[in-house]
Amino acid sequence: MQKIFFWLLLLFCSGAISAQKRPNILLIVSDDHAYQAISAYGSKLMQTRNIDRIAHGGVIFKNAFVTNSLCGPSRAVILTGKYSHVNGFKDNDHSRFDGSQDSFIKELQKNGYQTSWIGKWHLETTPQGFDFWQVLPGQGSYYNPDFLMMDGSKKRIDGYVSNIIEDISENWLDHRDTRKPFCLVIGHKATHRNWLPDTADLGKFDHQSFPLPHDFFDDYTGRKAASMQDMTIAKTLTMDYDLKIGTNDKADIGLKRMNPAQRKRYDDYYKKIADDFDARKLSGKALTEWKYERYMRDYLSTAIGLERNIGRVLDYLDTHGLSKNTIVIYMSDQGFYMGEHGWFDKRWMYEESFRTPMVMRYPGVVKPGSTCSGLVMNLDIAPTLLDAAGVQIPKDMQGKSFLPLLKKNMPIHDALYYHYYENGTHSVSPHFGVRTKQYKLICFYEKVNSWEFYDLKTDPHEMHNVYGKKEYEPKIALLRKRLKELIDQYGDKEALTILQEDKSL
């Protein structure tokens, strides 16, 4: 009996030690944060020392992409490892996430991980598979935001949203079960429209000038879908809601939520901006360029608060001895336009929208200061984290673990498939397509019926649609074939029907 007890004790202890050796997981997902605004990606717009800190301690992904460039759909893909047409969350207008389906969170929880999601959720239904969650309703508010609680109540918390999300996250870490590895997802609201900075960060970029992107006054020649959109800084960006000039209650930017001190700092700052604007009497291109400057200043000032709180959680890991055994991934839910083509927002399969920033730290596995040029997607996050945790990847997950890419430089994708569905907001036509390292083929449908093809080596800014050009016919034929293969592989029946009905094929 003593021998049996000894071996049982040894087995229990070895199991407990093994559980603790499994890496903790910290996944930080921001909203609409452009890689063009991150200094690790070469940006001169601002310094992002804390995001860079993750990259310097691990790897920066130069070719990370999304399957559907929209907030809710991207989160659903990250959770499930499945494309939008499989997980059911296609767009923000009509979709509700089916929480009963499997997710990497549920698989981790079943295998001994303590799980939590804090901050922006934006999936319209109650989170499932989490030991703890506290999330913003819908988009949430920048100031004094409401949070949905696990008991079904709603709680308003005073302060600025990025700071509050970090406070709640640290409090959860303080009270977690330290016998278990954890998986914490921090969902930030920043840098979503309408870019309302913390009062401490108002005016931080007012003395900085921002050169116009070379394609800022793009006329969209040869790109019918691009010519019909409604997301330009010149026409779509509003003076009241977006730029806070002459703000009224109808704009509903959250001013009523502010306490007197917050509102005073807000009013003092933006009144000076409004007075200066009124004195300038701007019109035409001068007005558009002024709007661009204001957009950049508010956007980047909002990003400061995000950046600062990423630093706070990294400091927490250091202070509590968790850094060496914690995977840290920072990513945005998709890319975003910083004036390229004259735009803000996302949605497109064009690079600034399709491509997302992603950096990862994985001590003992990923060499600090690494660069990964292989193609990866948000679709791959779920299987990668399960792989790292030693948990079997469900067969119906469509993504692939990118650990072999990091460990052995083994490519996991030779081509990427994209499908955007929403048909309304910003008048961006639904479309799907395929991208390889050099070429991109896009099929637009419903609002606009057209094809576009780009050679990204000679035309990285996608200014020249060469679909139909004789010299590119062999390459276009190859990409058509690869597109059909990916549609079949991922089971996208809607796209398949469109291809079959397209007479140009």
Image (cartoon, rainbow, N blue to C red):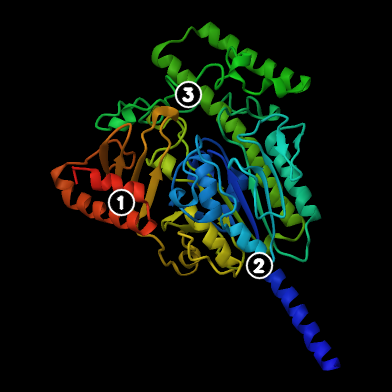
Camera-side residue: 268 or 205? 268
For label 2, the SS is loop
In whole angstroms, how far apart are the C-alphas of marks 1 and 3? 31 Å
Name the residue rendered at 72%, 69% in the picture: 20
In whole angstroms, how far apart are the C-alphas of marks 2 and 3? 49 Å
- Quadrant hosting residue 425: top left
Q: Position of residue 404 (x, y in %)?
A: 47, 68
Residue at the outermost right position: 2
Q: Is residue 246 left or right of residue 216?
A: right
Name the residue rendered at 50%, 34% in the picture: 93
| First reached walking from the N terminus: tag 2 or tag 3 | 2
Mark closer to the observer (1, 2) = 2
Q: Is residue 342 left or right of residue 479?
A: right
Name the residue rendered at 49%, 43% in the picture: 334
Residue 292: give its label: 3
Q: Is residue 409 above or below residue 476?
A: below
